[in-house]
Image (cartoon, rainbow, N blue to C red):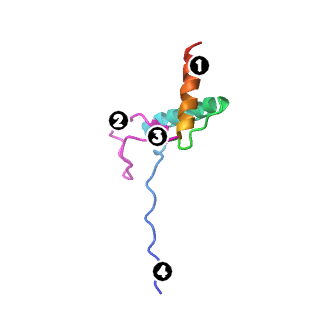
């Protein structure tokens, strides 16, 4: 019996230290965490929030490309969560 094929390694998701994009990625992670805390305080949780990078992952240490912004991906949510989020935004905007 042959062993199952090994999975390829996962792509590198975090820029290397010294990469100009590292600060932008850290900024996006902090923004995601801040938004998650604010939503949690309002009784709302988005189940799939994460941070994504719009640049391809490279292993060759290419630092010639400019650092781009990392994106806070809000993911998906159920209709009741979307309504609750809309109500919180409306109530906050009415202040």
- Residue at which label 2 appears: 66
Residue 40 location, x and y as percent? 64, 33
Residue 3: give its label.
4
Q: CA distance from mark 2 to mark 3?
A: 13 Å
Which of labels 2 and 3 is toward the front? 2
Which of labels 4 and 3 is toward the front? 4
Residue 73 location, x and y as percent? 47, 38
Q: Earlier in the sequence, mark 2 or mark 4?
A: 4
Does dot 2 land on a helix, a strand or a loop? loop
- Residue at which label 1 appears: 91
Which of labels 3 and 1 is toward the front? 1
Does dot 4 land on a helix, a strand or a loop? loop
Q: Are marks 1 and 2 in contact (CB under 8 Å)?
A: no
Specify the segment rendered in magenta: 51-77
Q: Earlier in the sequence, mark 1 or mark 4?
A: 4
Residue at left 62%, top 29%? 38
Residue at left 43%, top 40%? 19
Compared to 3, does 71 lie above or below? above
Which of labels 1 and 4 is toward the front? 1
Q: Earlier in the sequence, mark 2 or mark 3?
A: 3
Magenta stretch secondary structure, dominant = loop
Residue 6 location, x and y as percent? 45, 71
Q: Earlier in the sequence, mark 4 or mark 3?
A: 4
Q: CA distance from mark 4 to mark 3?
A: 40 Å
- Residue at which label 3 appears: 18
Q: Earlier in the sequence, mark 3 or mark 1?
A: 3
Residue 36 location, x and y as percent? 59, 34
Q: Nearer the viewer, residue 51 or 75?
A: 75
């Amino acid at each position: 019996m042959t062993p199952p094929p090994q999975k390829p390694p996962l792509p590198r998701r975090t820029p290397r230290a010294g990469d100009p994009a590292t600060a932008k990625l850290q900024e996006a992670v902090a923004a995601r965490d801040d938004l998650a805390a604010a939503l949690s305080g309002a009784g709302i949780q988005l189940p799939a929030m994460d941070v994504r990078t719009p640049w391809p992952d490279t292993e060759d240490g290419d630092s010639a490309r400019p650092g781009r912004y990392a994106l806070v991906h809000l993911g998906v949510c159920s209709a009741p969560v979307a309504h609750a989020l809309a109500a919180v935004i409306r109530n906050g905007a009415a202040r």
